Image (cartoon, helix red, strand yellow):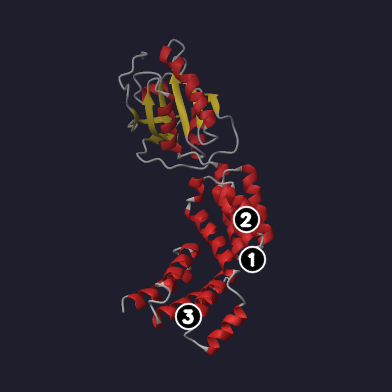
Amino acid sequence: MSGNNPYSGSYGSQMSATATYGGAPATASPSPAAVAPATSGPLISDTTTATFARDVLEASRGLPVLVDFWAPWCGPCKQLTPIIEKVVTEAGGRVKLVKMNIDDHPSIAGQLGIQSIPAVVAFVDGRPADGFMGAVPESQIRAFIEKIAGPMIDDQAAEIEAALAEAKQLLDAGDLQNAGGIFASVLQVEPESLPARAGLVEVMIASDALDQAREILSELSDEQKADPQVSALLKRLDQIDEARKLGDPKALEAALLADPDDHAARLNLAKIRNVEGDRQTAAEHLLTIMRRDRAFDDDGARRALVAFFEVWGPADPATLSARRKMSAILFS
């Protein structure tokens, strides 16, 4: 074998050899599957012909094992070794690296048809699955490991995502204290988390801590305020401010009993019911105005309903129901 690399620039070609190691047959696998990391044993080790079956074939049934075939005289091998060891270490236990000196143990490399070193062969489920030859760049080694073992999962990101989902469920269930606690905890870990900040604002609004909600939103950049979730919260606060200036809802209801066509009273009552959280009633008031007088307040009922949709969100059941009814009125 020589240090020349006839496969330079091409990694990931399928291994086609059939070989036996310690009496165990191993055949190429064209589509290796990612497997769960093993829980014990060193990530980087050396092997011999006698221990190959244990160190590689058996170990690869727990997670992929990369076998680095090298020799002391091989210059490219010396270049590859620190790079591949670094990448395997940073892979977080998704693969193991086993090194085999072909000068001392030539038979297995010969059975695999390896004609140039360094050569790296990935074993999955006891079989050679893929490989590359030559001192390839670090980026290619990372890509090779991702192909064999799957991409690295960011555990912290996954935990944050799960925490945000749990906080949203608690918020929807009305458990404001625990929801707020989780949103605040996420912000301690990731201060720039916009979903956590928006969630905390929702908790503040639901707790009627409107000044605190505004203070949190005031710290955001213009780009962050343009985010749909944040812009909806800003509009929601504006709607709350407006509704508090519209008078006593009982007086508005009395006005409607006396005159069902008092559209101004109905519009104001719709805005109050909206901020109270009674979305269905709020929408019905506005739809009633649209049915009776589309021109009232320069189509004000429709404009108010669209503003409600922007805060409720396009997938909210109240939005979907009211939008269907509005379309029927507009296009009837």
Earlier in the chain: of badge 2 and badge 1, it is 1
Q: Quadrant of the N terminus?
A: top left
Q: Nearer the viewer, mark 3 or mark 2?
A: 3
Residue 303 vertical placement versus 15 (above, below): below
Query: What x and y, as percent, mark residue 112?
Result: 37, 26
From the image, tell me which residue sits under label 2: 213
Residue that appears at 55% across and 30% down = 43
Q: Marks 1 and 2: in contact by CB < 8 Å?
A: no
Residue 210 vertical placement versus 36 (above, below): below
Earlier in the chain: of badge 3 and badge 1, it is 1
The answer to whether residue 332 is left or right of residue 218 is: left
Q: Quadrant of the C terminus?
A: bottom left
From this viewpoint, is residue 61 visible? Answer: yes
Alpha-carbon distance for marks 3 and 1? Answer: 33 Å
Query: What x and y, as percent, mark residue 59?
Result: 52, 35
Earlier in the chain: of badge 3 and badge 2, it is 2
Query: What x and y, as percent, mark residue 117?
Result: 39, 18
Mark 2 secondary-structure assignment: helix
Amino acid type of the residue that numbered disc 3 sits on in the rendered structure: His
Residue that appears at 49% across and 83% down = 262
The answer to whether residue 134 is left or right of residue 234 is: left
The answer to whether residue 17 is left or right of residue 213 is: left
From the image, tell me which residue sits under label 3: 263
The image's mark for residue 256 is none
Which sits in the foreground, 260 or 72? 260
Crowd band around label 2 with a 10 angstrom C-alpha radius: few (<14), some (14–19), many (20+): many
Which sits in the foreground, 165 or 195? 195
Crowd band around label 3 with a 10 angstrom C-alpha radius: few (<14), some (14–19), many (20+): many
Amino acid type of the residue that numbered disc 2 sits on in the rendered structure: Ala
Mark 1 secondary-structure assignment: loop
From the image, tell me which residue sits under label 1: 174
